Image: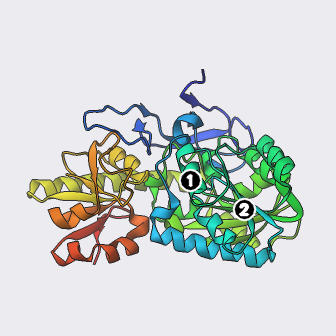
Amino acid sequence: MRPVHQRRTTCRGCSAAALSIFLELGPTPLANSLSSSGDEIAPTYPLDVALCSACGLVQLIDVIDAEVLFRDYVYVSGTSDTMQAHFATYANDVADLLSLGPKDLVIEAASNDGTLLRGLARRAIRVLGVEPARNVAALAESNGIPTLAEFFDESRGREIRRAHGPARAFIANNVLAHVDDPVDFLAGARELLTPDGRVFLEFPYLGSLVERLEWDTIYHEHLSYFSATSVAALLRRAGLSALDVLVTSVHGGSIRVTAGLDGEPSRRWSELLKNEAERGLGSLEVLTRFAGRVKENAEALFELVSSCRRRGMRLAAYGAPAKSTTLTSYARIDAHAIEFAVDKAPWKVGRFIPGARIPIRSVETLALERPDLALLFAWNFADEILRQQSAYRAAGGRFVVPIPVPKELP
């Protein structure tokens, strides 16, 4: 039987024993392990972030068994209007860039409910999803997207190629950060590609995390936090070449890296690498300053919530995303301060944010209960939420974003 928790002493990207911890967020529950009862005591695990001085990869050193984290998953892409629109555009971008047709195969690892692949299937392009969460893979199948309920790695890539043939495109969104051996994962992508095939990797960008103080996006599922520089090194080790990059606003600031078996990098890619070097993005000095700002923000958030409660104000939260677990844990916010959180996902309603024990209710509850303030835990969907919650705002309800500085939205 594998242990639930292990602690690394070497870098997951290059295997060097060169890890320096710069941020300790303390014992924290698993982000998406929503509690079924307000009395449930959620197990906690260390949440320490380190820099590898050898390759520049920022990473967690505490690893939770992937079977525990991902076999029964609560995040579904199609819940958000923002993500549906993003993936529809993304699908068209890939199809147009590679001039894909009915004979071409596109494979997506961690394909979730198939939201992106549906956009390609509508254009009569062959698609196959690989999704380890059995409940989410079944949802994708019910939506007409063929999906393997498996984890992806190099051996899986070879198996899929034997069964389905080579792929013109391999897509991996918000998943490379989830794997403990990213080089093995990327080698699986290499095994699948046609000679002219392309790999598309989209993930939250380390530069955005540091500059915008998005520290709540650090949780046990996210084992790595990538810069262009650190991803380039991983791709080289897997036998792939980084070719291009697109900066997107999704999830608070992401980048989409295009890679292939060979080819010359674009000017955009070269400029981003140069920019990172000039900013010292992968330096311990920059990251240590970031850690200090995180502590200041958590203290400011705790003081805001405490002050509101002392004045008799009623507080709620919008969203119960994974990042709400880190935020509430490190900022010491719980159900004594936040009466409830609301969320659009029906499978979250009736459960509780782990550790904080904040009950999760349907989004309609916000307008019915009319708390004075709602903390925007799902701040990456702020524009969408503000549009949808016009009734609550018209009744005098106010939203507060927690980062980078707690402030009320106009």
The quarter in which the C terminus is drawn is bottom left
Residue mark closest to the camera, 1 vs 2: 2
From where the camera sits, is residue 370 visible?
no
Q: Is residue 310 left or right of residue 60?
A: left
Residue at the spot of label 1: 285
Image coords of residue 239 (percent x, y): 86, 52
Give whichever of 353, 138 is nearer the camera: 138
Q: Residues within 10 Å of mark 1 (few under 14, many from 20)?
A: few
Q: Amino acid at mark 1?
A: Glu
Q: Amino acid at mark 2?
A: Val
Residue that lies at the very extreme toward the left in this rendered image: 312
Quadrant of the image occupied by residue 167:
bottom right
- Picture disc at residue 268: none
Residue that lies at the very extreme toward the right in this rendered image: 195
Give whichever of 148, 209 is nearer the camera: 148
Image coords of residue 174 (percent x, y): 59, 56
Q: CA distance from mark 1 to mark 2?
A: 44 Å
Q: Where 299 sits versus 370, above or below?
A: above
Residue at the spot of label 2: 127
At x 85% / y 57%, what residue is drawn? 166
At x 29% / y 62%, what residue is drawn? 363
| Upstream in sequence: badge 1 or badge 2 | 2
Image coords of residue 34 (percent x, y): 38, 42
Q: Where 271 sits versus 331, above or below?
A: below
Image coords of residue 253 (percent x, y): 54, 67
Q: Residues within 10 Å of mark 2 (few under 14, many from 20)?
A: many
